[in-house]
Image: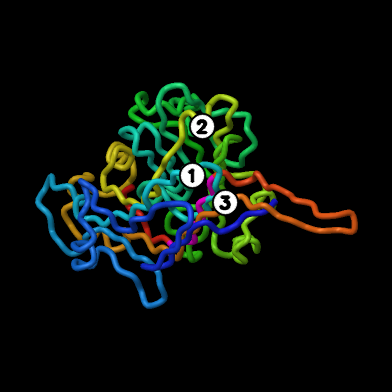
Amino acid sequence: MSTSLCSQWHGDVSSTGCARVTLYQCMPRFVDKDTAFSSGLAYVTSDNKVIMQGDNTTTLPYGTNRSRRLARILVDRMSIFKYLFRQDSAWFEQDLGWWNMAMDIIEGVHDNEHNQVTWHTAPGCNLTATTNFTGTVVQTNGVDNLQCNALINSNAGCGITEWSRASYGPYFDSQGGGVFAMKWDSNGIAVWSFYRAAIPQDINEGLPDPSNWGEPVAELAPTSCNITQFFANHSIVFDITFCGDWAGNSYSTSGCPGTCEEVLMDPANFVNASWIINSLKVYKSATLSSSSSSGANTYRSWIPAYIAAIMIVVGSLSFL
């Protein structure tokens, strides 16, 4: 199995061979690039880490959405299928419809310790619970959420919760963050995560090989979902949403003080609401050639279909 680097981003420097890239693109609900940088919502450190954070200095009146004072990083449409993404905290969204074609690779709310991987699709794509993955299928009232249909269950989608408490939240941060990787091809969409001390050597060497990583933490198999039908032309988005559907609706049972709307008013509550991104890399399958006494042999690796690789250190995400 072999992969080759297709695109990579470090700080404000990018090189790309398979995707159009707009690192800081203006979105309707978010500030534009100039505003983000001039107000300190986004910046690049001296060691090329990208910081993206919410406003933690402005006191807002009750009922104001602090999410409108956020930077949002968008890596533009991935138009080529059959790639591998290695990443750390990314959110994949398709631009063909409102929320009905999205993959959440890292997601959580409040002080959750376990990352949740979720797919949101049009009707007809379902999670196969018997697929080999180490996570646990998210349930509603004791029943597995196997339908990825974003138009039902308040857009809950079909989610899988990671087993490791080092996959999200304060403990993940204290370990120095880590790496999230996603393999996307016609055989399914699989996600792995590794906290800093457990990152595989092949990733550190820039030669990721999913066959060495064991079972994924989550996987959407083609058994009950036509991958090529439901997923295409995605963008990679880094986003923080304050008091969103999940966090807002679960705030009353979170053990946090007051209401979600009241918490949004005080900027001191968002000092740690940030992304710290080391790098983002996209790989594709590679063709290898070797020679022997009997002649030349050519080998084709079909492993990655979309591998997004992001090596990232993440600050606390209080409201996602």
Against 107, is 136 above or below?
above
Q: Which mark is residue 228?
A: 2
**Is 272 or 184 nearer to us in this picture?**
184
Q: Tell me: 147 left or right of 290.
A: left
- The answer, for residue 312, to whether it is visible in the render is no
The main secondary structure of the magenta stretch is: strand
User: Residue 40 in the image: x percent, y percent?
Assistant: 23, 67
Q: Are marks 1 and 3 in contact (CB under 8 Å)?
A: yes
Look at mark 1 in the image and give the residue it sits on. Answer: 80
> Distance between the Cα atoms at labels 2 and 3?
17 Å
Q: Residue placed at 53% from the left, 45% from the top?
A: 162
**Is 224 or 197 nearer to us in this picture?**
224
User: Residue 167 in the image: x percent, y percent?
Assistant: 50, 53
Task: Give the residue type at disc 3.
Answer: Lys
User: Residue 180 in the image: x percent, y percent?
Assistant: 51, 53
- Kindly give the residue lying farthest to the top in the view shown: 124
Asked whether residue 135 is drawn in magenta, I would say no
